[in-house]
Amino acid sequence: MRIPGWRLAVATLLVAIAGTGCSTGGSDAAGGGDTTKVNATSNAGECGKDTRTVAHELGSTEIKGTPERVVALEFSFVDALASIKLKPVGIADDNDTNRIIPQLRDQLAGYTSVGLRQSPNLQQISALKPDLIIADVRRHKNIYDQLSQIAPTIAFNSNQASYQKNLDSAAAIGQALNRCKAMDDRLAQHRKTMEELKAKIPAGKNDKFMFAVAGEKTFTVHTAAGYTPSVLEALGLTCVVPASGDTTQPEMNLESFVAANPPILFVTNPAGTLFEQWQKNPLAQQVTAIKDNKVFPVDVAVWSRWRGVTAAELIAQDVVTKVYGG
């Protein structure tokens, strides 16, 4: 008997869910998962030293003094710097100042754009005469040597790092900057803020959710290994999309979306996207989140691009306000 294509897609997804679960552990498989090696205490012994050897994802880097002119090539690193009141001299902002979240725009005003996060402009970076560059291990591995010739460079997993690994990277950045206490204090404040927000969610709810980025022709879900779902899982919610060995951000078709059947859906800026078209499809009307009116539009910059302590707090507040009325 011939199995209809959409039913085959459903079966495939369910097998994947059964086989992997919603672990946040990640994977070293090609192109996906969380490969972060550095933890919060990796560089603790270097704090306070005038010359520090800082371990990171691509090795270790000697850093002298207290860096002031820092270039950040991912938004999560910008968030870490802003968290301790240090404004980068250069940011890879994709040539768009509007990609800086409004909550930090005034604080960061006056930086120089160094181009795209995927392919930053090395000449612009060099012209800024930085004393530290913070790079993404995945995006910038191939230009790491060139960056290191410009200034001491440290690299962490940003794009596919989990929430906890992101916090570990922030701690390492504080150590590299010789601002350990300032970063430790900010992370302690962050943990307190997150616990306060978590306390506003009814105990024992364990609500299941999906987070997706909607495009004109794509619907990209973030797996449990990704940053935003792991923030929500830290609040006590459960991701319905399992960790994957291939990527933390797979694309999903309508049939797979229906099979996953999220009770709660957070989706970025859905107006005019493929998801808006799906909502008109009778098949999509079977999805619990749509039936129960629990589809929550969220801001793509905060929920997807930024990935830092400020973003996590904003995401948590969004969940409390939109889902639980807190």
Image: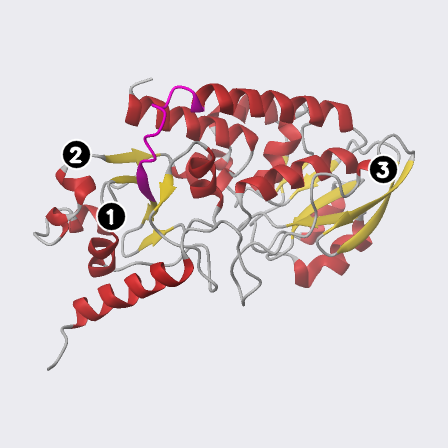
| Disc 3 residue crowd, few under 14, some 14–19, many 20+, Cα 10 Å | few
> Residues under labels 1 and 2: Cα distance?
18 Å
Disc sitting over residue 293 in the figure: 2
Q: Position of residue 247 (x, y in %)?
A: 46, 60
Which residue reaches farthest front? 204
Residue 202 is covered by the magenta coloring = yes
- Which residue does the image show at 74% across and 48% down from the upper left? 154
For badge 1, the amino acid type reads Thr
Residue at horizontal 64 percent and vertical 55 percent from the top: 137
* Residue 268 visible in the shown view: no
Image height check: is 257 above or below 42? below
Numbered tag placed on residue 119 in the rendering: none
Q: SS of the residue at dot 3?
A: helix
Residue range in magenta is 198-210
Image position of 24 with respect to 82: above or below: below
Residue hosting label 1: 273
Mark-to-mark CA distance, 1 and 3:
49 Å
Badge nearest the viewer, 1 or 2? 2
